[in-house]
Structures are given as structure tokens and as C-alpha cells.
């Protein structure tokens, strides 16, 4: 009789452990963003070929690992490479991010994300500084565990030597996440 009770207790515990809802899941994410800027050589009404009024100004690459809690809140550690060719600035931001899914339906999510960290510059022309960011995005559930991400972000990089000692930009991005 004791063996039957022990077997049922073990089966009950095993069933209970496997049937409980998971609290979260780890993920990997990556994206590429670009920033548009005003062409400083452009002149209104000029016949010179100085290019268009709005031109690409920067390119950002990001990778990160994180953990999502109950499909609503996610935290991540990220790193990346930023290249602003208009100002000849190379930067390597490392930052933590907090993402909150405003709405989630059928695996697709509309979210907001805040970022804070440190920005490293390899050049002696500019010192290291802080990195801040906030953005909105849309994550589309894909096949299996891959998701596509579209985003728009505001970035602030603390760089001495720029106006107000910072470089501000708005970027548009395309990326993915893998759960």
C-alpha cells in the first residue's frame, strides 16, 4: 500500500511541476537602425547638384540577451556599434533595457522600451559618455521562435564637444528576436 501511495504522490508532483504556467523565457535580440539628417550642403532653389535635402546620417547595430516575464515585461543587456559619419563618431554603447508590451495579441506586441548605459568611444577626440534611449516598436510573431521587430527610437549620447555636450538622434530600425 505504501508503494502505491508513493507512486501516486510522485506522479502527482511530476504532473503539477510540468503543468504550471512558466513565468518567463530567455531571448536573444538584434537590430539595425539608421538615422536621417539634413544635408548641410543643400541650398533651396540652387541648380547645383548638392544632393537631396534629407540624407542618411548614422547606422547603429545592436545585439542583446534578456529575459521576458509573462509576455509583458522584459529586461535585457545590450551592446552595439554606432557610426555617425557626418561627425566622424564611432561609439560602442553598452546598456540595460526595460521593455514593456503595451498590447499583446496573438503573439504580436506593441511595446515601449527605455535604455540606459555607458557609451565607449575608441577615439581620443571624444571622451566616453552616457547613453540614454527611449522608443516604440512593433514585434510580429514569426514561425517557430523567430519574431520580426520594427522600431523608432530616440537616442541621446553624452559626448563632450558637441552642442550641449550631447548628440541626439531619432532612428528607424528593423530587427529580430529569438525566444
Image: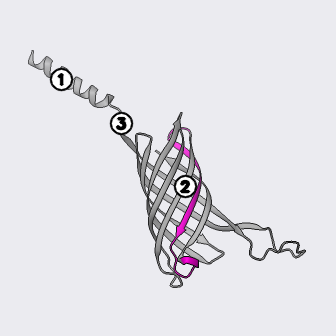
Q: Which residue is mark 2?
A: 135
Q: Which residue is mark 1?
A: 9
Distance between the alpha carbons at the discs numbered 1 and 2: 50 Å
Q: Which residue is mark 3?
A: 22
How packed mark 3 is, by other alpha carbons closer than 10 Å (few <14, some 14-19, many 20 or more), is few
Task: Tell me what residue is drawn at x 63 percent, y 68 percent.
Answer: 58
* Sequence-first disc among 1 and 3: 1
User: Is residue 43 left or right of 93 when viewed as pictured?
Assistant: right
How packed mark 1 is, by other alpha carbons closer than 10 Å (few <14, some 14-19, many 20 or more), is few
Q: Can you give x and y, in whole percent of width and height, for residue 100 in the image? A: 47, 47
Q: Is residue 155 magenta?
A: yes
Distance between the alpha carbons at the discs numbered 1 and 3: 22 Å
Residues at badges 1 and 2 in contact (C-beta under 8 Å)? no
Q: Can you give x and y, in whole percent of width and height, for residue 149 in the image? A: 57, 48
The region drawn magenta spans: 143-164
Distance between the alpha carbons at the discs numbered 2 and 3: 28 Å
Image vertical order of residue 144 relative to residue 58, above or below = above
Of helix, strand and loop, which one carries label 1? helix
4 or 175: nearer the viewer: 175
Task: Tell me what residue is drawn at x 69 percent, y 66 percent.
Answer: 56
Of helix, strand and loop, which one carries label 2? strand
Of helix, strand and loop, which one carries label 3? loop
Q: Can you give x and y, in whole percent of width and height, for residue 30 in the image? A: 52, 55
Task: Tell me what residue is drawn at x 55 percent, y 50 percent.
Answer: 176
Q: Quadrant of the N terminus?
A: top left
- In the orientation shown, which residue stands out farthest toward the front? 164
Which dot, 1 or 2, sits closer to the camera? 2
Which dot, 2 or 3, sits closer to the camera? 2
Image vertical order of residue 39 relative to residue 63, above or below = below
Amino acid at each position: 500500500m505504501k508503494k502505491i501511495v508513493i507512486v501516486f504522490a510522485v506522479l502527482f508532483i511530476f504532473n503539477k511541476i510540468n503543468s504550471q504556467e512558466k513565468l518567463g523565457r530567455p531571448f536573444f535580440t538584434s537590430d539595425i537602425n539608421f538615422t536621417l539628417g539634413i544635408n548641410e550642403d543643400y541650398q533651396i532653389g540652387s541648380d547645383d547638384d548638392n544632393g537631396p535635402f534629407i540624407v542618411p546620417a548614422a547606422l547603429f547595430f545592436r545585439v542583446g540577451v534578456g529575459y521576458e516575464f509573462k509576455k509583458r515585461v522584459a529586461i535585457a543587456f545590450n551592446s552595439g556599434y554606432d557610426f555617425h559619419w557626418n561627425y566622424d563618431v564611432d561609439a560602442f554603447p553598452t546598456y540595460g533595457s526595460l521593455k514593456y508590451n503595451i498590447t499583446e495579441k496573438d503573439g504580436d506586441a506593441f511595446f515601449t522600451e527605455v535604455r540606459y548605459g555607458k557609451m565607449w568611444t575608441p577615439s581620443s577626440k571624444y571622451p566616453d559618455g552616457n547613453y540614454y534611449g527611449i522608443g516604440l516598436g512593433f514585434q510580429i510573431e514569426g514561425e517557430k521562435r523567430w519574431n520580426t521587430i520594427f522600431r523608432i527610437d530616440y537616442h541621446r549620447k553624452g559626448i563632450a564637444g558637441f552642442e550641449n555636450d550631447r548628440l541626439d538622434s531619432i532612428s528607424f530600425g528593423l530587427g529580430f528576436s529569438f525566444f
